[in-house]
Amino acid sequence: MGLLSCVTINNEWDIVKARQLGRECARDVGFSTVDQARIATAVSELARNIYLYTDSGQLCFEQISHTEQKGMTLVSLDDGPGMDDISQMMEDGYSTSGGLGTGLPGVKRLVDQFDIQSEKGKGTEIRAVKWTR
Amino acid sequence: MDTLKPDAANYQRLLKHYIAAQDEQSLYGAEQISKQFIQNNVPPEDIVNLHNQAMASLYSDMPAYFRHSMNFLLETMISYGVMLQEYHTLREEQSELKSEIAVAANMQDTLLKTTTPDMEGMDIGVISVPAHQMNGDYYHFVTGSDGLLGVAVADVIGKGIPAALCMSMIKYSMDSLPEKIMRPQTILENLNRVVERNVDDSMFITMFYAQFIPSGGTVRYSSAGHEPGFYFNAQQNTFEELEAKGLVLGVDPDTNYQQYERVLHQGDMLILLTDGVTECRQGDRFIESQEVLDVIGRFSHLPAQEMVDNVYKHFEWLQDFHLRDDFTLIVLKKV
């Protein structure tokens, strides 16, 4: 297992930092330019969610490998309000931030595996995995 | 993306040709490729990437600023790509919903099936067309063992699925009424209680019920707030509105309905309809009820079924083949 590197999201500038770190990690793993851009967009979306809906949270990246495949995991951790209804959050077209973001369904589409756990009042943990092709 | 591979060579070849000749043929080729991309769900960022790679292999001296600009463009396309996928998912969901509704509409047709009776001395024409997939209008024929013919025309205020669900209830309550009480006013009074008990306050049903007694040509009728029908006097060649007062079904459980009577002579007609007929619109203008009668009058020499078919065709044309409300028209002609 590779190195875990994290960015704490407190303000909007941290979203840029997270994108940058995520892209560097993706480049190190060997993702194509297009996939690097997809990963950066997924990172943006996760970081924005932390910035908009929680007081503070973290975005971490980890290089992973499985037999001959290489990939990376994006982990979003926060101790914010948690989600009332995860199914609704994952529904296409549902977005509390005004509808223009790709939202969580968008993040799910940009990666290969997506897992979300949330508890009201305790926080949310999202793990997204993308593999090189 | 694997589906992209055969296109990549083709794209590069066309691009090269176009840069050299700037010809329309290459652009036509581009159009064809673009359709393939759409067919294969290729997201826009992959197309930008494809272009970038084609340019890099055609021009080894491609300037760095151009390469950077392409990467910048690629980045802006990512969210478009995600939205495109979302659009595809939504479209699939929509077609699933549509086929589910089609099944429901089919079921409605079966549940509400009524056959137009073949009756001595009476020529009957019926047309009922829903504005959307499911019909909120309803008509029903009842031929009693006493030889009487009952005709019900109803309209749920509201369209689509809720209206259609409501209609099934009306049909089954009508079926369960004992035959001996089958007089228009008692039928409406019974249905009124059923609707009042079972239907949401925001939903109303209007109904016109007519009963034809073949022996003397008498017609009895009652209305629960329904669009008034018309009586056509063949001898004078005039139409007259069938005045019938009554509260819509489902408002007050103790409503009493009045019953009216009229005698039909040879050639006379009874015309029952829903507001989808009288509220036809030409552009933003509602047509006048006189216009409806003019159109009906124009076809009154035809057999009843041809009459209603022609009237419908006329209004369908008038409304640019786009019904705004369910359309039901019944003609009973004494022959």
Image (cartoon, coloured by chain):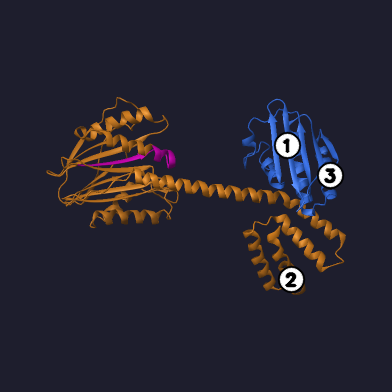
- Quickly name the residue at label 1: A126
Amino acid beneath label 1:
Ile
Give the x, y percent position of residue B155: 35, 40
Q: Is residue B106 visible?
A: yes
Report the residue at 71% width, 57% height from top: B1
Residue numbers of the magenta segment: B149-165
Q: Residues within 10 Å of mark 1 (few under 14, many from 20)?
A: some
Chain B appears in which tint? orange
Judge depth for marks 1 and 2 and give the one in front: 1
Mark 3–mark 1 distance (CA, rounded to whole Å): 19 Å
> What residue lies at 85% left-to-right and 39% top-to-bottom?
A5
Q: Can residue B225 be seen in this view?
A: no
Judging from the image, mark 3 belongs to the subunit labelled A
Relative image position of residue A82 (x, y in whole percent): 70, 29
Residue A93 at x, y = what percent?
62, 42
Q: In this view, does B251 lie to the left or right of A35?
A: left
* Residue that protrudes farthest toward the left in the picture: B215
Which tint is chain A? blue
Identify which amino acid the numbered label 2 is placed on. Arg
> Residue B199 falls in which quadrant of the image?
top left
- The residue tagged 2 is B13
Q: Nearer the viewer, mark 3 or mark 1?
A: 1
- Same chain under badges 1 and 2? The reply is no
Q: How far apart are marks 2 and 3 (CA)?
A: 36 Å
10 Å crowding of disc 2: few (<14), some (14-19), many (20+)? some
* Residue receiving disc 3: A20
Closer-to-camera residue (A18/B258): A18
